[in-house]
Amino acid sequence: MAGLMSGFGGFTHAVVRAIPESLAKEALRTGSLEVDLLKAQKEHDEYVSVLKHRLGLEVVELPADETLPDCVFVEDAAVVCGDTALITRPGAESRRKETEAMKDTLTELGLNIVEMTDESATLDGGDVLFTGREFFVGLSKRTNQRGAEILADTFKDYAVSTVPVQGCLHLKSFCSMAGPDLIAIGSSEAAQKALKIMQQMSDHKYDKLTIPDDLAANCVYMKLPGKGDVLLHCTPEEFPESAKVFEKLKDHMLIPVSNQEKVKVDGALTCCSVLFSKNNNI
């Protein structure tokens, strides 16, 4: 099995997309809370500003598309590893056209493009957890076995294991990487069950950071020149107990980022960017 990818977390670029006005009323959602569009846009502007100004990434901002209410959640449209981008086939039919702008952008940025064209396959990027050593792919309402197989064919250097996802939208609805070999995982029964499966599937022993709130376990880890380990995580206002757990990561630069509005349409912090390195290291 491959070791830890050289430069894991060493991102140089981010692709993001503006929030369409249609998000408030028409975006897919599992809940029924009303979205404050202006607050959602302000939240997203702050997220993009952190990536661009505070962390110094080269940020490519795609315009909103009113016909695609969920288009801000760019993570679902592509999985990038090294210099290869797999353009996905989202599980929700209403989201399939979101991949067109992503494909064009990543092509212009010089990545090798692989398209998922098999009509029996579905894959949302929110179901793909890359640890730097291997991939875990959530089998959910949005991602199926065939989608996972195509991902495995695309990134042959890495082991790919599938994990059943129940009770939430995506695998990363309750987990993410909080550092090299460190998995942030929610404390619910479903999250802990998924973690146990991941541990059984892997040849590697990961450390775990158990987060009281499942939604808060979705965080964004980077390792950047001059900044070291960086973690974007939920704010204390949203999840006070979970924020306290992140504060134990004394070696990380911790950046709380609000996600109070986008979470109402099942959006999380990782959902809103596609991160990669132009130096062939991720």
Image (cartoon, rainbow, N blue to C red):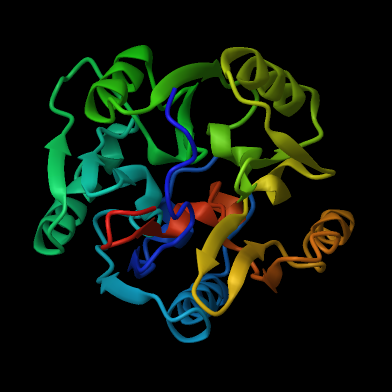
Query: Left of 139 or right of it: where is 66?
Result: left
Query: Left of 113 or right of it: where is 19?
Result: right
Q: Is residue 279 above or below residue 37?
A: above
Q: Is residue 64 above or below residue 96?
A: below
Q: Quadrant of the N terminus?
A: top left
Query: Left of 195 or right of it: where is 148?
Result: left
Please tell me which residue is depicted at 54% across the width and 80% down the height of the picture.
226
Residue 132: percent from left, percent from top: 48, 41
Quadrant in which residue 184 is drawn: top right
Query: Left of 112 or right of it: where is 36?
Result: right
Residue 21: percent from left, percent from top: 38, 68
Residue 142: percent from left, percent from top: 41, 27
- Residue in front for this viewpoint, 261 or 3: 3
Quadrant in which residue 108 is drawn: bottom left
Q: Is residue 192 above or below residue 224?
A: above
Please tell me which residue is depicted at 83% across the width and 64% down the height of the picture.
247
Q: Is residue 271 above or below residue 13?
A: above
Quadrant in which residue 174 is drawn: top right
